[in-house]
């Protein structure tokens, strides 16, 4: 390989209290929390809009509630509140959410379905960030991080405005890929234990027809009713089991990576139809990702043909939206001060530094939080080992696949964002390292800002 040595040049510098890199599921909430707690905050995002996995890769937001229906006699309670719930409230005003629609079947997997309109979510996130005084830098790529003695002093970005350095007292990596952490020299592994996805919005369809197909063939796993096209008590989620299809169809669905689960907040539209593809290597490999992008779009075409052929009322189905790039469930796993385990989750463990509580596991038929309760996310699980002013959030924490199937979920990631953003603002204000932050101070501010904690751990 040939090399070119760049000439020296001066790079303009921007200075902040807190810099959040990645405007996705965690990053939006982290930036809001930071700015609202008095920190001069920058949010840097590679795309032209915020939202991340919530608007590109999901089927619904999992999950704001405990699993009360799976445990008769257990109290129903909303365990994620604060800024994540504020976003839902704004979406409801705009007609962009199903509400927290109670699951009518399959509540051993999830207790509610919170479906959203992807495009309205982008607008709501933009508006809330602007209102909170966050400085937004969209279409801006992270290229490097400067680590001096175990502390990040700056990051380098590129955009059409040129190269810039962002200095800050505290940084939050919410890139999903762990890019800040990796560039700063943090320890990480690349496990490659999840498929990648491109989810598409599909028009010209009938969710009632999808439900009828499931019932006719004995495939129905789960459904819920909520607000759709402004009308209450409408189907908003249907989940079918492909394993119960006739062998030829089952193999066809498996080969194209089609997940037979749909959500919708509008008539005649599936907000997400998820197409999966398991890569041979980690999705940090650019060349392999390019091949995966092509394969996923070929599979999308096959999926549309399948939907037209087999699902009643979907004979004229068409692709109305796709994600601009494939989305991931995990890329790099960052070494933090604590690694959440499956036992922590299913045994409903709490810690002396909980920053929120959570109750959902994405393998609900196999793993559930004991007695419909909650487990705590410890502050130390967000602190990147060996670096004094960097938090990791979202799908890049938790090394165990089984534990990761809880902590990576969207609503957990939103809550992680509020915790990290709040902590970063407090640390920057006092000019202290992230491990010097008194827990009682952080807890008091989180409670003030609407974060729910269990009274009796």
Image (spheres, rainbow, N blue to C red):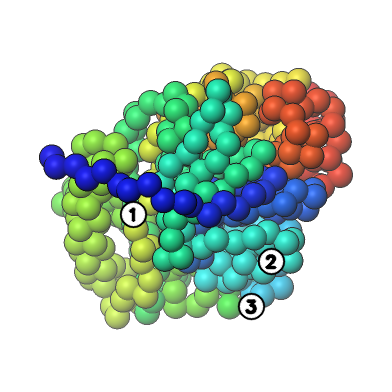
Residue 37, position in %: x, y?
Answer: 79, 48
| Tag 2 residue | 130
**Residue designated by label 3:** 230
| Residue 250 seen by the camera | no
Image-based side of 17 in relation to 411, left or right: right
Label 2 close to label 3 by CB (< 8 Å)? no
Quadrant of the image for the C terminus?
top right
Figure quadrant of residue 115: bottom right
Q: Residue at x 32, y 33 (%)?
A: 192
Count all numbered tags in the image, as a single digit.
Answer: 3
* N-terminal label among 2 and 3: 2
Compared across the picture, whether 178 is left or right of 425 comes to left
In the image, 356 versus 179, the foreground residue is 179
Give me the C-alpha separation between circle 1 and circle 3.
Answer: 31 Å
Write down the residue under mark 1.
326
Instruction: Examine the rendered structure and indicate whether residue 284 appears above or below residue 190.
Output: below
Q: Residue at x 29, y 80 (%)?
A: 316
Q: Secondary structure at mark 2?
A: helix
Residue nearest the observer in this picture, 420 or 403: 420
Counting other residues with Cα less than 10 Å from the Cα at mark 2, is it few (<14), some (14-19), or many (20 or more)?
A: few
* Rendering coords of residue 212 (x, y %): 40, 66
CA gap, disc 2 to disc 1? 28 Å
Residue at image point 47% right, 27% down: 186
Asked if one can make out residue 7 in the rendered structure from this viewpoint, the answer is: yes
Which residue is pictured at 34% across the width and 58% down the height? 325
Marks 1 and 3 in Cβ contact (< 8 Å): no
Q: Quadrant of residue 301?
A: bottom left
Kindly report which numbered mark, 2 or 1, lies closer to the viewer in this rendering.
Answer: 2
Q: Nearer the viewer, mark 1 or mark 3?
A: 1
- Specify the label residue 425 is tagged with: none
Q: Is residue 437 left or right of residue 178?
A: right
């Amino acid at each position: 390989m040939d090399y070119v040595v760049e000439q020296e040049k001066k790079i303009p510098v921007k200075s902040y209290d807190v810099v959040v890199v990645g405007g996705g599921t965690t990053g939006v909430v982290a930036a809001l929390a930071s700015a609202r707690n008095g920190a001069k905050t920058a949010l840097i995002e590679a795309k032209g809009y915020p939202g991340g996995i919530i608007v590109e890769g999901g089927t619904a937001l999992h999950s704001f509630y405990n699993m009360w229906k799976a445990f008769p006699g257990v109290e129903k309670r909303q365990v994620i509140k604060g800024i994540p719930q504020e976003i839902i409230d704004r979406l409801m005003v705009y007609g962009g959410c199903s509400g927290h629609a109670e699951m009518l079947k399959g509540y051993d997997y999830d207790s509610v379905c919170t479906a959203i309109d992807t495009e309205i979510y982008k607008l709501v996130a933009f508006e809330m960030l602007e209102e909170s005084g966050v400085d937004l830098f969209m279409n801006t790529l992270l290229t490097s991080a400067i680590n001096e003695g175990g502390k990040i002093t700056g990051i380098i970005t590129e955009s059409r405005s040129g190269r810039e350095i962002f200095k800050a007292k505290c940084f939050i990596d919410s890139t999903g890929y762990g890019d800040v952490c990796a560039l700063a020299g943090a320890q990480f592994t690349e496990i490659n234990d999840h498929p990648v996805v491109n989810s598409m919005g599909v028009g010209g369809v009938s969710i009632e027809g999808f439900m009828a197909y499931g019932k006719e063939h004995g495939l129905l796993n789960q459904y819920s009713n909520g607000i759709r096209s402004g009308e209450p008590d409408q189907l908003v989620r249907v989940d079918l089991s492909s394993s119960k299809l006739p062998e030829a169809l089952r193999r066809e669905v498996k080969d194209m990576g089609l997940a037979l689960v749909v959500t919708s907040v509008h008539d005649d539209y599936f907000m997400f139809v998820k197409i999966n593809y398991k890569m041979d290597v980690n999705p940090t490999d650019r060349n392999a990702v390019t091949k995966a992008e092509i394969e996923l779009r070929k599979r999308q075409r096959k999926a549309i043909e399948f939907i037209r052929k087999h699902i009643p009322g979907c004979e004229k189905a068409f692709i109305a939206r796709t994600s601009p790039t494939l989305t991931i469930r995990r890329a790099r796993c960052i070494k933090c001060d604590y690694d959440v385990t499956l036992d922590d989750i299913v045994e409903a463990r709490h810690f002396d530094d909980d920053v929120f509580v959570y109750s959902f596991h994405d393998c609900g038929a196999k793993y559930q939080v004991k007695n419909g309760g909650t487990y705590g996310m410890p502050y130390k699980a967000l602190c990147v080992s060996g670096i004094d002013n960097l938090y990791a959030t979202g799908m890049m924490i938790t090394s165990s696949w089984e534990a990761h199937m809880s902590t990576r979920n969207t609503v957990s990631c939103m809550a992680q964002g509020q915790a990290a953003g709040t902590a970063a603002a407090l640390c920057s204000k006092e000019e202290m390292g992230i491990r010097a932050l008194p827990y009682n101070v952080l807890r008091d501010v989180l409670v003030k800002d609407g974060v729910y904690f269990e009274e009796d751990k």
